[in-house]
Amino acid sequence: MIDKLDFLVSSGRPTELPSEQKTRVANELVRVEDPLLIDDKLDQIKNQIALRDAQSLAEIISIHTPTMATVDSYSLPSKIAALRDLGFLVAAYHTIEPDPQICPETTEVLVRLGSELGMPPRDTLYTYSVWNPSNSRRRSFTNSMQEETFISSITDWSNSLHAGLIGLMALNTEQLNVTEDVTEGLAYSFRQMQQAMVNVRQSITSEWFYQTLQPYFKNISIAGESYEPPSGAHMNLLLMDHLLWGADSTDTIYTNYRNHNLAYLPEGYKRLVTEENASSIYTLLKTKYEAGETPAKHVLSTLLDISTAIVSFRRVHLALAKEMLEIKFPEGIPPNNKEMLKLTALISGVSEIRNLIKLIQT
């Protein structure tokens, strides 16, 4: 099963995505690992974070940073877990220390792990969610039920998006000529994604997220380079947009957004943005429509449901972003805010394919 994990972090050419179930099993190989031996120190670490004891946390990081020889001896799951745990500790330290100073040995290990795994040398959305152990072994900053719900929902979301990607790739590869079992699986994955979004919305307020959790998600400088924190922009929804409508988009706001955030996805997902997927499903639909061809009803209805679900999600995201920006800028959100412009462009792009499907169905 390690070969399924290798798909996500190696730099070979794409063949096909492992199934959702096989990917879950492969991810579990990482979740069970504790290469830095911090499981028994988690209560102590979380207490240090809560007390904002930066000095003690720095000592923990120094003590548990492995030697380069040890890193070289790690298996693939252990290397991912090492990046997860060291990234978690460094992110917490950066939040509570006004002038963070990472020892050279830790920096060297982070850079080596990031380079070998094709990932940023810090914590990412994937180390925070699908590769994060559960229950008493959970790597979390606030040790709260809200954060537990947040991590669990992101994990469910990521798994559902992975399944959805498999279906969209089949639609693209087969020129929309797929059987109903493919579209049914695709529709189910999006229903699961929507439920995860509802769970977050019902359990977490914008105020709690912005004031309590978001401070732990900040840019970190490693070896002179600045790296962004885990973000919703680093989810596989980025690839959903690409396959649905963005592969041949010329909108510079969108293309800059996509190309920038690809760097934070595991290698296996980055490779899906290739010349093999140069035409989006939107372009396939438009070409068939102009040629007088109509895709099967189950294909159109599923694509309509999916595009509608993404529009709904993006609008919720836009509303949440606006709420948080209003907290950050109580005197008024600055005009031409990049976050608002980006989300508006994403909504506009997926709305185009939704409107085209409605036109075809009439």
Image (cartoon, rainbow, N blue to C red):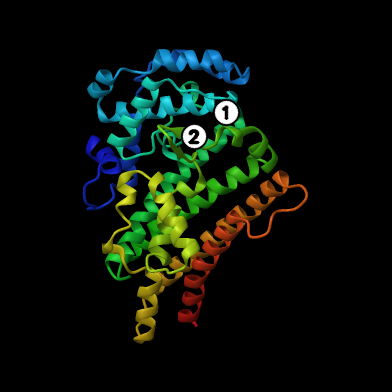
- The structure residue drawn at horizontal position 38% and vertical position 74%, both measured from the top left corner, is 283
Residue positioned most to the right: 331
**Label 1, residues with CA under 10 Å away: few <14, some 14-19, many ≥20:** many
User: In the image, 229: left or right of 316?
Assistant: left
- Name the residue type under label 1: Thr
* Residue 102 image point, x, y percent: 46, 23
Asked if the residues shown at circle 2 and circle 1 are in contact, with their CB atoms under 8 angstroms apart, the answer is no
- Label drawn at residue 55: none
User: In the image, 68: left or right of 144?
Assistant: left
The residue that disc 2 covers is 220
- Name the residue type under label 2: Ile
Say above or below: 57 vs 162. Answer: above
Say above or below: 322 vs 23. Answer: below
Q: CA distance from mark 2 to mark 1?
A: 10 Å
Say above or below: 285 vs 140. Answer: below
Q: Nearer the viewer, residue 189 or 218?
A: 218
**Label 2, residues with CA under 10 Å away: few <14, some 14-19, many ≥20:** many
* Residue 19 image point, x, y percent: 30, 47
* Observer able to see residue 188: no
Point out the image quarter for the N terminus. Answer: top left
The residue that disc 1 covers is 95
* Observer able to see residue 177: yes
